[in-house]
Every structure is written in structure tokens, then in C-alpha cells.
Amino acid sequence: MNMTTVLGRLGVDDYTLSTRDKRALDDDGFLRLENLMTSKEVAAFVRRLDELSEIEDEDAGKEVHQEQGTIRLSNLIDKDPIFEKCIISPRLLAAVRHVLGDEFKVSSLNSRAALPGHGRQGLHADWGGAVALGNYFVCNSIWLLTDFTRQNGATRVVPGSHRCGQTAADVMSDTTSDHPDQVQLIGEAGTVVVFNAHLWHGGMKNETESPRRAMHSYFCRRDQRQQLDQRKWLRKETLARLSLESKVILDVADVDERSEDIENLKPEK
């Protein structure tokens, strides 16, 4: 089964997104999908992420990245069936398809909670350099698990920067400083913001007393390396429960068995 078939089976077609939605992705580089999660789903995600953070403790996020002032978790697909929603939601996939075309795959599924007084990032893209207009390699999404507000440091983006053929570092002496064209992605918990990951973006400082929580389902073109090698990290128990569609999206549809050597490399859940 190829990705075109998978997308069709999941209900993704040329009309899943409106013309306005597609224009937002093309021109601004991002699209808000409101109410993609119910309040019960948000609560379930938060509860499970809290459990995993406690279990993994100082190892949390090590599969991909750890960051001072945040709580990061990685490899979420492998850790609970509830996270499969984050890679198969039709409107999400339609937006990724619009940016990358049919031939894409999951690169990683992680979470990030910016703690009070922390979370500021420099403006950056999720790619190593500038790209030509329309030649995009990566697409990301932010799953808002708390309301994103100005006070808690909602992610900032520079609309249209994915089309400029430059990186933020090419034109800014200090990428942590404010950009005159930046806007913050304000939204209620349950919203998902999909963005062309060549768009300049970055978290801002959380000025409240509560964590700013989000998950990131990150996609890349099918000819690129994943941020987290799904073939290495997915356990055989996970492979057994995943739908065929999810396996294709993760690029593990042809994997039948896991070696014991690889299993022994993984941290305990």
C-alpha cells in the first residue's frame, strides 16, 4: 500500500481543506485547525504525558532531545495507543500533503512543556538551511494541550518567511530578539496548528505559573531521514497494534520482527 492509497482510505482528498486553508499554508505558512481534539482527549493526553514524565524522569526526551527549562518526551507512538491520533487525523494529513505532496512520512512525535520562566527560543526553521520556493522537505504541527496565550509564551512565527529563501540567522544578528513581523499562535487547547516547517518560528518565555503544554507531530518527505528512526525504536508490541495505514505513514509497513539487540537498547517505559 502506498501513501496515496493510505490518504484515500483515511478520507483525505482534494476537498478536505478549503481553498482558504490552502492559501493560508501557501502564503502565511501555517494553518489553525480548531477543535481537532475534544476536551476529554486533551485531558487524556495530559494525564498520560504526566505519567510518562514521572516514569522516565531524567531520561525523558533522550531519544531525540532534552532542553533546559522544559519537559520533553519523545517516541510517543511507541508509548501508548492514544497517540496514534496525532499521525492519522485527516485534516492534519491533508495539510501536510498540501505542503509536501503525497510522498511523506512521520519524522517524529514528541511533546514539549515550557516551564514557568522558560521556553524562549530563537527564531528557526526545522531544516538546516534555506530552500527554493516550493521545494519543501518538512512540515510540523503543534497540538495545543493548554491554551496558548501571550502570557504563557505562545509560539511566534514570521508569516511568509518560508518563501523568502533565507534563514532567520541570515538576516538577524540575534534570532532570540523580536522580529517586526512576528505573530503569536494564540489558540485554545484542542487546536492543532500545522505549519510549513521552513517557516521561522520559536517558543516564547512562559510568564505564568503553569507549564505551556504541546505535542509536535513532525513529518518529512519520504526520501528524507526521520528525526527518530521508527524502524529502530518501535517495539514489536507497538507494530502489532498499529493499523496498516499508520505503519505506512511511519514507513514501517514491511517490518515484521525486531531484533533483541535493538530491544535491549531502548529505555524502559
Image (tube, rainbow, N blue to C red):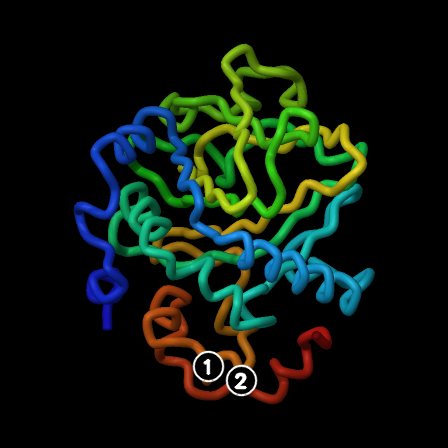
Asked where in the image residue 4 lies, by quadrant, the reply is bottom left
Q: Residue furthest left?
A: 14
Looking at the rendered image, the quarter that the C terminus falls into is bottom right
Residue 258, given in percent of the width and then of the height, sits at: 52, 85
Foreground pick, 155 / 146: 146
* In the image, residue 213 above or below residue 61: above
Disc 2 residue crowd, few under 14, some 14–19, many 20+, Cα 10 Å = few
Query: Do the CB atoms of the residues marked 1 and 2 lie less than 8 Å apart?
Result: yes
Label annotation for residue 266: none
- Which picture quadrant has residue 123? top right
Specify few, some or many for label 1: CA neighbours under 10 Å numbering under 14, 14-19, or 20 or more: few
Residue type, numbered disc 1: Arg
Tell which of 149 and 23 is nearer to you.
Answer: 149
Which residue is denoted by mark 1 in the rendering? Answer: 241
Frontmost residue, 155 versus 255: 155
- Please say if 198 is above or below 241: above
Element at label 1: helix
Q: Quadrant of the N terminus?
A: bottom left
The picture places residue 226, in percent across and down from the top left corner, at 47, 58
The residue that appears at 27% across and 29% down in the rendered structure is: 23
Identity of the residue drawn at 53% across and 84% down: 237
* Side of 67 where 243 appears, left or right: left
Residue at x 52% of width, y 21% of height:
183
**Up-down: is 187 above or below 61?**
above
Q: Which residue is mark 2?
A: 237
* Residue 252 relative to residue 46: left or right: left
Please state the horizontal and vertical placement of residue 159, each as a whole percent of the image: 43, 22
Label 2 secondary element? helix
**Tally of marks:** 2
Quadrant of the image occupied by residue 152: top right
Q: CA distance from mark 1 to mark 2?
A: 7 Å
Q: In the image, what residue type sits under mark 2?
A: Glu
